[in-house]
Image (cartoon, coloured by chain):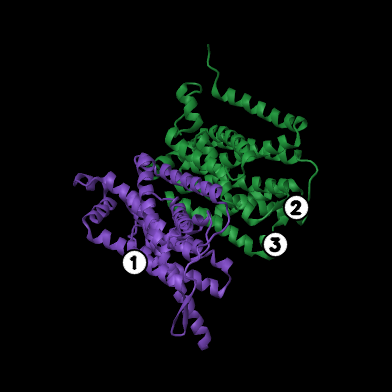
Chain colours: A green, B purple
């Protein structure tokens, strides 16, 4: 039996996924669409978090900050009716990336836990600024968006974004750039000594990575119809991204997808029982995965021989 | 400046320093763990929260004096801390730092989730010694004065323990170089366990005292952990004296900011301090530059 190349399998899966995205909204009930949207949202968050944290090892607790910035940018642009909604979504992503480009200069000099904590602090600061900048954001009152009759455009937008996030992380992961990012994770000093411009690579990964939560936040705002600082800047967005990536297998490009699907479906089931339980489930999952299967679902499949051994990311 | 303004500022400074006392107890505990174990313990705030609730339930259910209830609370959390180290954190020692960071992050989320489920998100408080003391023209809340005094005493006791006892010396040796300490016959695994227990005990005591002074909820840990990071980063990681002075400085900065601006903006002080120090002088005020 000849082995089919991984690239062909991935291409097939991608075509099937796109087909599903187009077909699903026409048959699914409203609940199905909103659940599907959540799965796609978590895939976007996880895959983009993986780009900076899984590949380069710079663990960021700041994904919620970019999500919040994108939510507010998108929501305000829509409310003031300045741009068509899908342009507003793109602008939200670009604003998020721009902020990442600026704060990347000072923060990416910091190593390991310092970076993690600084990103958390900046995300919280963004929440406090948004709450207090009443003239622009309406402060703690939040922003109300127009009510939509049809969720399908949002679903498709999130679907395109998810596909883009996954394709980008695949392209980066399998390229020479990806190797350099991994080299940074394994030993930044050694990478630098080998002539890799570590700062430039980290910075690029950071800017690309923060585009996705920005757009996702804007689509989320349009879908949910009401945002306030404490809901869109909530740490839980970072937690979801981290838990999904850890569960699926961090540093692999399929891991975040598998993790996001598994995590969202499990938490949806738990959520229906008790809305407070999700934190126990998420926290417990992270601890369990780290202790029992540190490589996540992907490593588990690989060890069983069900998937081709990938480069150990 | 008018006399009234001066008096107000004196009042604010005193309450800032009293606040700083509790911060000091909490932050030096975290600093100890970070220094010895090289683990940024993101669950430290939740250990504090568990301390607050243990004291709350002990005093509410058994009618124990809250100040006395702190003693069993500290013992329980010391034991809990050593068990956490033995069964969970120990497994991450030889792994990349990422693992330990994410493990404590998972624990933090887990503990907070469990507390939210058991005790709801409602704010609670322990009503105890609600009177105040007059010192000259200044009025100081009785419970804050006593709470802060206890916190400072415990912080001093921890400092003395690390400085002057043989075991304290083992802890400091492990912090300096774990492998060399091991070669010199120090049981490093045991030292780490006790260190994590001590850090947890300090968090528990600080949580109990904070619960006497302010209202609290399962989410209190998130707020205090940010303050503690600001403090130990300001003081320089691993520096006990730095963390102590950083705690007083942060308490002071927060109350002054609340007085001159709004309480909401004052919430941002720890984050601003944290970001500024990390960007301008990452080694902190008392830490050795890399």
Q: What residue did someone put label 1 on?
A: B153
Q: Is residue A49 visible?
A: no
Q: Which residue is outermost to the top?
A: A1
Circle 2 or circle 1, nearest the eye: 1
Q: Residues within 10 Å of mark 2 (few under 14, many from 20)?
A: some
Q: Residues within 10 Å of mark 1 (few under 14, many from 20)?
A: some
Instruction: Note whether B152 is above or below A46 in the view shown.
Output: below
Query: To which chain does the residue with label 2 belong?
Result: A
Instruction: Note whether A36 is above or below A309 in the view shown.
Output: below
Query: To which chain does the residue with label 1 belong?
Result: B
Q: What residue did someone put label 2 on?
A: A145
Q: CA distance from mark 3 to mark 1?
A: 46 Å
Q: Position of residue A231 (x, y in %)?
A: 63, 52
Circle 3 or circle 1, nearest the eye: 1
Q: Earlier in the sequence, mark 3 or mark 2?
A: 3
Q: Residue at x 37, y 66 (%)?
A: B150
Please tell me the numbered disc located at residue A138.
3
Q: Position of residue B7 (x, y in %)?
A: 49, 83
Query: To which chain does the residue with label 3 belong?
Result: A
Q: Residue at x 28, y 45 (%)?
A: B190
**Same chain, marks 3 and 2?**
yes
């Amino acid at each position: 039996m000849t082995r089919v190349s991984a690239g062909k399998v991935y291409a097939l899966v991608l075509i099937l996924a796109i087909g599903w995205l187009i077909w699903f909204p026409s048959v699914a009930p409203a609940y199905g669409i909103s659940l599907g949207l959540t799965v796609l949202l978590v895939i976007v968050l996880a895959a983009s978090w993986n780009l900076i944290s899984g590949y380069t090892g710079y663990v960021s607790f700041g994904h919620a900050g970019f999500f919040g910035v994108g939510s507010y940018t998108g929501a305000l642009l829509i409310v003031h009716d300045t741009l068509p909604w899908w342009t507003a979504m793109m602008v939200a992503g670009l604003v998020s990336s721009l902020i990442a480009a600026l704060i990347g200069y000072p923060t990416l000099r910091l190593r390991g836990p310092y970076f993690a904590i600084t990103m958390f602090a900046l995300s919280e600061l963004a929440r406090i600024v948004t709450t207090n900048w009443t003239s622009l954001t309406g402060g703690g009152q939040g922003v109300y968006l127009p009510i939509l009759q049809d969720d399908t455009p949002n679903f498709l937008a999130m679907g395109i974004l998810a596909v883009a996030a996954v394709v980008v992380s695949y392209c980066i992961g399998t390229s020479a750039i990806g190797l350099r990012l991994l080299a940074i994770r394994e030993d930044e000093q050694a990478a630098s000594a080998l002539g890799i411009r570590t700062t430039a690579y980290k910075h690029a990964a950071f800017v690309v990575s923060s585009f996705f939560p920005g757009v996702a936040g804007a689509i989320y705002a349009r879908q949910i119809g009401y945002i306030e600082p404490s809901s869109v800047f909530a740490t839980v967005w970072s937690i979801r991204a981290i838990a999904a990536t850890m569960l699926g297998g961090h540093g692999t490009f399929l891991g975040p997808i598998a993790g996001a699907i598994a995590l969202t479906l499990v938490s949806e089931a738990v959520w229906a029982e008790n809305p407070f339980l999700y934190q126990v489930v998420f926290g417990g999952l992270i601890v369990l995965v780290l202790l029992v299967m540190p490589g996540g679902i992907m490593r588990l499949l690989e060890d069983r021989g069900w998937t081709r051994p990938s480069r150990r990311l | 400046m008018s006399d009234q303004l001066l008096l107000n500022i004196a009042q604010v400074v005193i309450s800032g320093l009293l606040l700083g006392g509790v911060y000091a107890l909490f932050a030096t505990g975290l600093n100890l763990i970070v220094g010895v174990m090289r683990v940024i313990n993101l669950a430290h705030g939740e250990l504090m929260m568990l301390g607050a609730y243990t004291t709350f339930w002990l005093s509410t259910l058994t009618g124990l004096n809250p100040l006395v209830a702190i003693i069993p609370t500290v013992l329980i959390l010391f034991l809990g801390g050593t068990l956490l180290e033995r069964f969970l954190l120990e497994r991450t020692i030889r792994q990349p730092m990422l693992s330990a960071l994410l493990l404590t992050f998972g624990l933090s989320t887990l503990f907070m989730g469990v507390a939210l489920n058991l005790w709801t998100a409602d704010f609670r408080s322990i009503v105890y010694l609600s009177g105040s003391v007059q010192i000259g023209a200044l009025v100081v809340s009785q419970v804050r004065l006593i709470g802060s005094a206890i916190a400072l005493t415990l912080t001093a006791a921890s400092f003395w323990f690390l400085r002057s006892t043989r075991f304290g010396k083992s802890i400091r040796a492990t912090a300096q170089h774990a492998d060399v300490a091991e070669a010199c016959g120090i049981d490093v695994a045991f030292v780490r366990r006790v260190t994590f227990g001590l850090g947890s005990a300090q968090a528990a005591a600080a949580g109990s005292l904070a619960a006497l002074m302010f209202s609290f909820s399962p989410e209190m840990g998130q707020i205090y952990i940010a303050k503690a990071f600001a403090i130990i980063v300001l003081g320089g990681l691993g520096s006990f004296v730095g963390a102590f002075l950083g705690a007083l400085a942060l308490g002071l900065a927060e109350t002054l900011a609340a007085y001159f601006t709004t309480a909401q903006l004052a919430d941002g002080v720890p984050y601003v301090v944290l970001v500024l120090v990390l960007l301008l002088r990452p080694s902190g005020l008392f830490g050795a530059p890399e």
